Amino acid sequence: MREGLRRGFPTEPSRRLRCLAVQRHLALIAALPLIACAAPVAVDDDSGTPPVDASVPEIAPRDTGTADTGGDMDAGADASPPPMDASLPDVGAGVAVLQINEVNPNVTGSLDLVELRVVTAGSTAGITLEQDITSAVVLATLPAINVAQGDLIVVHLTPPSGVTNETSSKTSCANAACYPGAYDVRGAAVGITYSGRVLVVRAPNTTIEDGVSFYRQGSTSPGSFPGELMALQAAGHWLPANCGGPCNTVMLAEGVSADWNGCGTTETGASAYRKGNADTNTKNDWAVGTQSFGAPNP
């Protein structure tokens, strides 16, 4: 008995002493609660240390809040969705994004032409082509066409009777005015005003997909032109974003707009076109020259 005490525990300790020994041992293990002693615990006579009770569950390390890194074994439940391309407008699911690519606003009889290029594939149903923003005139409402990136759409304003909407094939329109390299679409019975104007493409949810500010050198732009330009700037579709202050005079508005002077009076005449798909939202994207409706721009 005395030899047992010198070693730290009595050889045959009482039930109470055995319980205290177990509790003292378990206190060394982080996060383990003290257990109630319901039965005698065996003691190693040589060391005086109670053996580990296999019935006590192993406690996993505490979660320190480390972020999910998405490793090979990660089920992906915490993964974040990929970021959206901030350069593209939020037009709604499945809606195509179109860009104004070529324009002739000067064809005799208001038979004006506008070519749209597909930037993002989708449906064109309900997309509108409009002149101006604050006093908008709808030039065309597109039918449902499932378009691919790079496809071209030619909108015929005041269209001849033989021009039909092409919704499934670029060659279904047999009229001579149609372009085999593009989807031909009938627009409204109205022409584009050939002066200081803003043209925009608007999604069905009213978001502007693209816009261009044009003026005609040598002609007088309307007094409303600066306001239309500033509306396009405010929508984030034209640069510079200001003129060192508001672009609130005709002279200032024309100074930052693309000049479409020189467009021809026939469908085969010169047009204003986007140079090689340039898209900096500035007047430098545009030039006037040989038309290329239904084909890639020079």
Image (tube, helix red, strand yellow):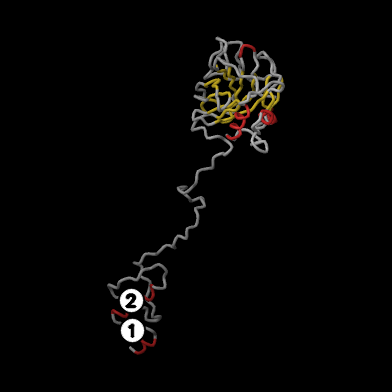
Q: Earlier in the sequence, mark 2 or mark 1?
A: 1
**Image disc number at residue 268:** none
CB-based contact (under 8 Å), mark 2 and mark 1? no
Residue beneath the point at 38% across and 80% down: 48
Residue beneath the point at 63% across and 29% down: 226
Q: Is residue 288 left or right of residue 33?
A: right
Which of these two is toward me, 39 or 150? 150
**Image disc number at residue 11:** 1
Quadrant showing the C terminus? top right
Question: As displayed, is residue 144 above or below residue 92?
Answer: above
Q: Which residue is mark 2?
A: 42
Residue type at the position of mark 2: Ala
Q: CA distance from mark 2 to mark 1?
A: 11 Å
At label 2, counting other C-alpha atoms closer than 10 Å, the crowd grade (few under 14, some 14-19, many 20 or more) is: some
Residue 136 drawn at (x, y percent): 55, 24
Residue type at the position of mark 1: Thr
Q: Is residue 216 left or right of residue 169?
A: right
